[in-house]
Each structure stands twice: as structure tokens, then as C-alpha cells.
Image: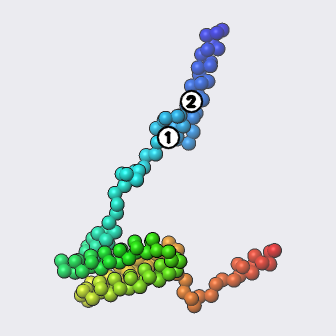
Amino acid sequence: MKRIAYTLFLVLVACSTQAQIRNYGMDRRIGGPGSVPSGPTNRERKPVDYVQLSLDRMETNLKLDALQKAVIKEALNDYYKVATALQTEDLPAEGKYEKLKKEAEKMDKRIIEILNAEQKAKYAEMKAKKAEKGKKKGKGKKSEEEEPDLTKLDSLMMAQ
């Protein structure tokens, strides 16, 4: 009888342990494989060079020559220096946005000055795609001419 009770006890303990492992596909045991994050840590992450990424994308899309590449790299570097400096400034978000917008316009002027007609068309197309992508994500600003939809607000006020 003791042997049956002991066997039954071991089966119950084993089943509860397996249930913990199978619960949502995670191993919840202390020190188990699920207790340590598997993603890269801050020490493992490499800093991203946004200037080089932007330059590489523009080089492949616009087929830039060496002079154009050098001028565009300088313009991008200047823009990113201002952008990183603005992160530490004590300005309201709207002020930072306006400064970044002005710097982006300066950068665009410098870039457009050295592009030929075909490259200018492709650059405008790239910017339009980027703007469209931003609007899809909800980052686009509403124009001041648009009036807000008050029907939802009116229906909420009527319900109260």
C-alpha cells in the first residue's frame, strides 16, 4: 500500500511540474531558461549611424557620384548634429519641431542644389513616399483648414 501511495505521489508531483512548464509555453521554474531575457542587452547593441543609413539609401536610389555623396553626407551630418543638440535643449515640443523643420528645409535645399533633374524627381518621390508613410502611422499633422468632426462630441454630450 505504501508503494502505491508513494508512486501516486510521484506521479502527481511530476504532472504538476509538467503543467508549470507547459503553461503558455513558458518554463516558470526558478533559474529555468525562461527566466533570463534572450534579447540583446544595452552592451550588445551597436549604435546606429543614421547619417550613413540615409546616405546609403540615397546613394542606391539616386545613383550619386562621389561629389554629391560628400556634399549630402555633410548636409546630413549638420542636420543630425542640430537634431541631437535639440534633444537636450529646454524648449517646448512645438519649438523643437519648428527648429527641426527649418533645419530639414536647409538640408533639402543643400541636397537639391547638387542633384540633376532626374535625381531631383526621384528625391521628390522619395520624400513623398516618406510623408505618406508618416501619415499612415498617424504622424502627419492635420491641416489648419480642416474642421474637427463634432458629431461624435455632440452625441457624447447628448448621452449625458
Image: 26 above or below 146: above
SS category of the residue bearing label 2? helix
Q: Residue reaching furthest front? A: 90
Q: Compared to 16, does 126 lie above or below?
A: below
Q: Quadrant of residue 85?
A: bottom left
Residue at 49% from the left image edge and 40% from the top image edge: 35
Query: How many residues crowd around disc 1 within 10 Å: few (fewer than 14), some, or many (20 or more)?
Result: few
Residue in the foreground of this view, choosing between 53 and 63: 53
Image quadrant where one finds the N terminus: top right
The number of numbered discs placed on residues in the rendered structure image is 2
104 lies left or right of 71: right
Q: Residue at x 40, y 72 (%)?
A: 84
User: Residue visible at 69% across and 83% down?
Assistant: 150
Q: Nearer the viewer, residue 10 or 53?
A: 53
**Where is residue 129 drawn, in percent x and y?**
40, 78
The residue that disc 2 covers is 17
Residues at discs 1 and 2 in contact (Cβ within 8 Å): no
Rendered location of residue 47, percent (x, y): 34, 60
Kindly identify the amino acid type of the residue bearing the numbered disc 2.
Thr
Q: Which residue is mark 1?
A: 35
Label located before the other in sequence (1 or 2): 2
Q: Which mark is residue 156?
A: none
The residue at the far left in this view is 66
Q: Label 1 amino acid?
A: Ser
- Locate the C terminus and report the quarter of the image it occupies: bottom right
The answer, for residue 57, to whether it is visible in the render is no
Image height check: is 88 above or below 42?
A: below
Q: Nearer the viewer, mark 1 or mark 2?
A: 1
Q: Is 4 positioned to the left or the right of 42 in the image?
A: right
The residue nearer to you, when weighing 114 against 117, is 114
